Structure formats: structure tokens, C-alpha cells
Amino acid sequence: MFHGRGPEGNRLVQGKPDWTAGCIAVRDDEIEDIYAMLQPGVPVMIYP
């Protein structure tokens, strides 16, 4: 899963270890870009 941070932004993630539970967290503007580029079911490769 990809997660945007929502209207609360960074305030919710500061000081919280591993709040994504293994998902990818991005800014809301970044998730909008990702959404515009992908079709449902398309695999996404994440490289370190």
C-alpha cells in the first residue's frame, strides 16, 4: 500500500516508529502523481 499523510501532515508521524506497518508513505502531492501514472493492478517495484 501507498499512503498519503493527509491534512495532518508530518505532525502525525513525528516520533512514531514504523507507523506505516510496511507500507510506503509519501506526501499527498506525491501520491496524486503516483495515482495519475498507474492503472489498477499494475505492479510497482520498490528499490532501496
Image: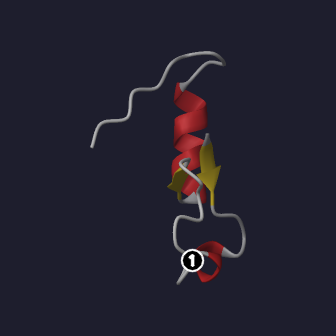
Amino acid found under the numbered disc labelled 1: Lys
Residue 28, x across and y down, in percent: 60, 57
Image point (46%, 26%), residue name: 44
Residue 38, x across and y down, in percent: 56, 24
> Which is more toward the observer, 33 or 12?
12
Image point (66%, 19%), residue name: 40
> SS at mark 1?
loop
In the rendered image, the vertical position of residue 14 relative to residue 35, given as above or below: below
In the rendered image, the vertical position of residue 14 relative to residue 38, given as above or below: below
Residue neighbourhood size for the residue with mark 1, other residues' Cα within 10 Å, grouped as few (<14), some (14–19), many (≥20): few
In the rendered image, the vertical position of residue 39 relative to residue 25, given as above or below: above
> Which is more toward the observer, 21 or 4?
21
Image point (39%, 27%), residue name: 45
For label 1, the residue is 16
Q: Residue furthest right?
A: 7
Residue 43, x across and y down, in percent: 50, 19
**Quadrant of the image containing the N terminus:** top right
In the rendered image, the vertical position of residue 20 relative to residue 7, given as above or below: above
Q: Is residue 39 left or right of residue 34?
A: right
Image point (53%, 37%), residue name: 34
Q: Residue furthest left?
A: 48
**Quadrant of the image containing the C terminus:** top left
Q: Quadrant of residue 5?
A: bottom right
